Image: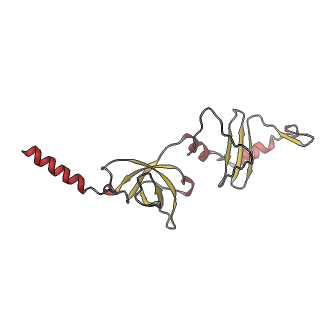
Amino acid sequence: MNDTKSDEIEDANESLVSEYSVAAGEIIIGTLVGLNDNGQALVDFAQNPDSTPLAAMSTTIVTQQQVSRQVALLFNQGDLKQPIIMGLIHSPLQAMLENFGQHNETEKIELAGDLNIDDVKVAGNKVTFEAQDEMVFKCGESSITLTKAGKIMIRGKYLLNRSSGVNRIMGGSVQVN
C-alpha cells in the first residue's frame, strides 16, 4: 500500500513540473546568438519556449567575437526561461580562426624584408604570387591565408559567396556550424 501512495505522489509531482523545465543538472547545447545592449548574452536552443533568443547569465566572459559558437547551458531551478552559460563548446576550427592572424609587429616587418621580386610573376592577364610557407592577403578586418600544407583560411566580419551557376562545397568531410 505504501508503494501505491508513493507512486501516486511521484505521478502528482511529475504533473506539477512545468512544461518549461528540465531535470536538475541536465545540460542543453545551445547557440550564442548575440549580446544585448547591456552586454548580456542572448542564447537560443532547441527547447526554447520563446520564439526569440533569451538573455542568459554566464559563468564565463562572453564576447561579440564568440557569437555563433555553441554553448553548454544549465537552467536556474530547471526553468528553461532562465539559461546559464556554463561554457563554450570547443571547436578546433573555431580555435584556429581565433588564433589566426595573431602575429606581432616584428614578425610582420621581418616577413616584409624577405620579399623578393621573383615571387611575383606577370604573364599576360595573369598575376601569380608565390611564397614558401604562407601567404596572407589582408585588408582591414578581413584576410585570406594560404599555407604550404594546402589550407585556405578566409576570415571576415561578413562573408558573401555568390554564384550564377552551381555552387559546390566538396571535401573529405563538410561541417556547417
At 37% from the left and 59% from the top, the residue drawn is 82
Q: Measuring from the top left, give residue 62's x and y in whole percent.
A: 50, 56
Q: Is residue 153 left or right of residue 55?
A: right
Residue 102: x %, y % from top left:
64, 47
Total marks in image:
0
Q: Nearer the viewer, residue 135 or 111?
A: 135
Q: How is the image coloured?
A: secondary structure
- Rendered view: 36 above or below 150: below
Residue that sits furthest to the right in the current view: 124
**What residue is at 68 percent from the left and 46 percent from the top?**
154
Q: Nearer the viewer, residue 19 or 158?
A: 19
* Pick the front one: 6 or 70: 6
Near-viewer residue (75 or 118): 75
Quarter in which the N terminus is drawn: top left
Give me the residue at 32% from left, 48% from top.
25
Residue lying farthest to the left in this orientation: 1
Q: Position of residue 164 (x, y in %)?
A: 75, 48
- Residue beneath the point at 70% across and 43% down: 167
Does 141 sit left or right of 115 as displayed? left
Q: Is 30 left, or right, of 153 in this rendering?
A: left
Residue at the far bottom in the pictured view? 37
